[in-house]
Every structure is written in structure tokens, then in C-alpha cells.
Image (cartoon, helix red, strand yellow):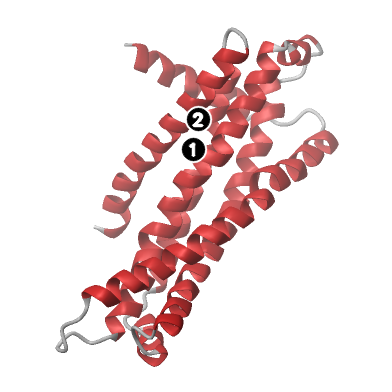
Amino acid sequence: MNYLRHIGKYFIMLRQVFRIPQKWSVFREMLFREIEDLGLKSLGIIAFISFFVGGVIAIQTALNVDNPFIPKYLIGFATKQSMILEFAPTFMSVILAGKVGSYISSSIGTMRVTEQIDALEVMGINSLNYLVLPKIIATMFFYPLLISLAMFLGIFGGYVAGTLTDLFYSEDYLYGLRLDFDPYYIQYALIKTVVFAFVIATVPAYHGYYVKGGSLEVGRASTQAVVWTSVVIILLNYFLTQMLLA
């Protein structure tokens, strides 16, 4: 029953979030700030991890494809499919859940325990709309760009890994990339990314907004936010894959 209470409270929160902003100039300023904090500052870690993940996928595939009857172009094909379908949208979203989710939960939680949110409410400001809506819009519009970059860098990382290790020829790798390419897979990955971005922005915000206590409780709320955001992403990944690919 406790879980049902939290789910109901979460959707009640969303109803307050999606209201028309009271001051568009303030909302626009908050939106650009959130794009920088939640999006631009995550570029480095996403680029670094996706590049080396692509390289690892290519190397492991090449080491396992040692049968002369199995064509080498399957290395490029497997790297492309793995990065586009699963590693870029899902694995990178889980990483963002840890990095961005903890930041959102701790920042809003700190505002709650220091009574800054109460001050906003006293001034007649819809604090949920003011604090959470810019985060939702920033993540849902910017994270597809991040994941698209992760796809490209992952595939490029596989190409670089093959060139440096001489495990396969670059011509075979490029042929595997072009083999049986379906543009719908890109669309599928971006749809998942938008859904995951919504979860990354709202679930940690819920944990931070309703935290009670002091700094210790803020830390616990941040941990819970990361855990539950990751759990929801994994569950939604299963259902979205069933709906969009099955």
C-alpha cells in the first residue's frame, strides 16, 4: 500500500507541474539554466563512455567471431545494432539517472529542508511548476541529442578499436554498418530516450520535493531517487521494446 501511495502522490505532483508558468521571462531563464546543468555538463561523460563502450563491443565481437565461415562484417553490424538499440538509449540513460538524478533530488531536497520551497509558496509561486517543469523540458529536448551523439561515438569507437588492434578490416566494419540498416531503429531509440528523460527529471524531483528532515535525509532521498529511477527505466525499457519492436 505504501508503494501505491507514492505512485498516487507522484501523479498528483505531475498535475501541479504541468501548469502555465506565471512569468515566462523567469521560466525561460530557468530553462536555459537547466539545459546547461542537466544537458551540456553531461556531454563529457556521455562522449567518453559511449566511445569506449563501442570499442569494447567491437573488440569482444571480433574475438568471438574466429570461425572462418563467419563473415567479419558481422562485427560492424553487431556494434551498430547494440549501440543503437540498447547501449546508447538505455545504458546511457541509466548513467544519466545516476549523475543527473542525484543532482535534481539533492538540489530540490536542500531547498525543501532549508525552507526555500516554503518561501516560494508564501509568495504565491507554484513551486513544482517553477522547479520541475524546466527540468522536464530541458531533458526531453536535449537528451535525444546526447543519445544521438552516443550512437555515433560508440560506432566510431568500434571503428577506431578495429583500426588500432588489427582485429578486422575497416572495409568489413563499414560494410557491416550499412548492412540491413533500418531507420526505424533510430526512431525507436529516440522514443525510448524521450520517455527515459521524463523519468529522469520527475522521479528524482519527487523524492527531493517531499523529503522530510535534514541533510542526512536529503542524502538518503538522493540514493532512493537514483535507485528508483534506474528501476523504472529498466521496466519501461522492457515494455517499450515489446510495444515498438515485437
Task: Single out the residue that lies furthest toward the bottom.
Answer: 171
Image vertical order of residue 95 relative to residue 61, above or below = above
Tag 1, which secondary structure? helix
> Between marks 2 and 1, how big is the CA–CA gap?
6 Å
Please tell me which residue is depicted at 38% across the width and 84% down the height of the picture: 173
Numbered circle sitting on residue 203: 2
Q: Residue at x 65, y 24 (%)?
A: 108
Q: Which quarter of the rendering shows the C terminus?
A: bottom left
Name the residue furthest front. Answer: 165
Query: On the rendered structure, is 33 left or right of 4?
Result: right
The image shows residue 19 at horizontal and vertical percentages of: 66, 28
* 179 on left or right of 126: left
Asked whether the viewer can see residue 195, the reply is: no
The location of residue 27, given as percent across then percent down, is 78, 36
The amino acid marked with disc number 2 is: Val
Decide if residue 150 is on the left or right side of residue 107. Answer: left
Q: Secondary structure at mark 2?
A: helix
Look at the picture and state if 144 lies above or below 222. below
Instruction: In this rendered view, identify the residue nearer to me: 106 or 90.
Output: 106
Q: Amino acid at mark 1?
A: Val
Relative to 54, residue 112 above or below:
above
Is 11 placed left or right of 62 in the picture? right
Report the residue at 43% width, 62% height from top: 53
* Numbered tag placed on residue 199 in the rendering: 1
Answer with the quarter of the image where residue 137 lies: top right
Q: Look at the picture and state if 80 lies above or below 17.
A: below
